Image (cartoon, grey):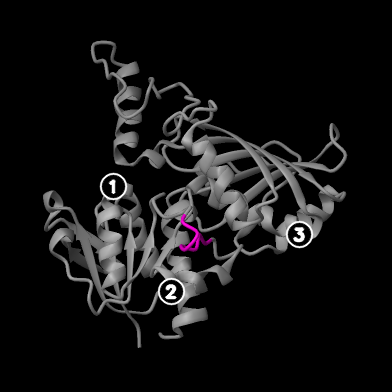
Amino acid sequence: MGYKVVVCGATGNVGREMLNILAERQFPIDEIAALASRRSLGTEVSFGDKTLKTKDLDQFDFTGWDIAFFAIGSDASKKYVPMAARAGCIAIDNSSLYRYDPDVPLVVPEVNPEAVEGYAKKNIIANPNCSTAQMVVALKPLHDRARIKRVVVSTYQSVSGAGKEGMDELWDQTKAVYNPVTEVAPSKFQKQIAFNVIPHIDSFMEDGSTKEEWKMVAETKKIVDPSIKVTATCVRVPVFVGHSEAVNVEFEEFLDEDEARDILREAPGVLVVDKREDGGYVTPIECVGDYATFVSRIRQDSTIENGLNLWIVSDNLRKGAALNAVQIAETLGTRVLKKG
């Protein structure tokens, strides 16, 4: 026996990826509904070897459905997630709206699977920020061994993190560089993204950090350990899919780079590719379509007593969003619902 599953935002990048991953991982489904806004009504989306026609999210009755995945942004989630939850359907929300609510679990299944059991307070589970998700998958097994004191992270985030509009803007501006007659002014991003990098993701806060950087701090504390100090600089780069991170970690205890490499090789969801030779590391283009979080360039930091440097790469549409949401549902099924 399987579940009755709803995917909200089924025509967007993350929604389509959720449908792909549900099919790929053979999540036990008896019935599935693909929902979208009225302007996308009737759009066809793929689910395995089937084609689904989208239904109107605004008119949908969640009563009798088991799990709803939401990839519709915070404003829409504010309206529709509580509707699903009140109807008895467990909502797994990809937006930032509920991540910092103490009554809503924020879950990365490789890191804190037990947290799903707290869903019952509001019938909602939050999916973390894409850049946080891949980082904590790599940090948690190291934290268990040597206790992390401080993390300094610089991200290199792809334009797909800003949705289809971000991908279109990079594509259009790149073409325009080679066709001087055409000019594509920044719209989705604050400055030209083609052949450029922009140290600005989300809005600025009073202390000079951006909301994206604050998310990495707050979410790492909630998912892994509130005592970890985190400082982040988040940068948008002209890459279509795949987020990269340069991460410096300071531990309470000494952790040898070889031991760290061995720990990460055994860690769930992590794939170590770390050869000290030309090309012996993973770049974003190589991680696209993969489930794993890749870790490379593992090395001692000689400038502090107990430090390591890591290079972490993952497909942000998968582990950073859709895959993690499906893994939450799988964990929910194994630990709580025990159906299917």
Tag 2 or tag 1, which sits nearer the N-term?
1
Instruction: Give the number of the disc on residue 75.
Output: 1
Q: Residues within 10 Å of mark 3 (few under 14, many from 20)?
A: some
Q: Secondary structure at mark 1?
A: helix
Left or right: 43, with 16 as reference point: left
Residue identified by numbered label 3: 263
Q: Amino acid at mark 1?
A: Asp
Q: Residues within 10 Å of mark 2 (few under 14, many from 20)?
A: some
Q: What residue is drawn where x is 41% and y is 55%? A: 98
Q: Position of residue 263 (x, y in %)?
A: 76, 59
Instruction: Give the number of the disc on residue 184.
Output: none
Q: Amino acid at mark 3?
A: Ile
Q: Nearer the viewer, residue 340 or 124?
A: 124
Where does the magenta region start and end? 101-107
Left or right: 132, with 140 as reference point: left
Q: What residue is drawn where x is 31% and y is 56%? A: 16
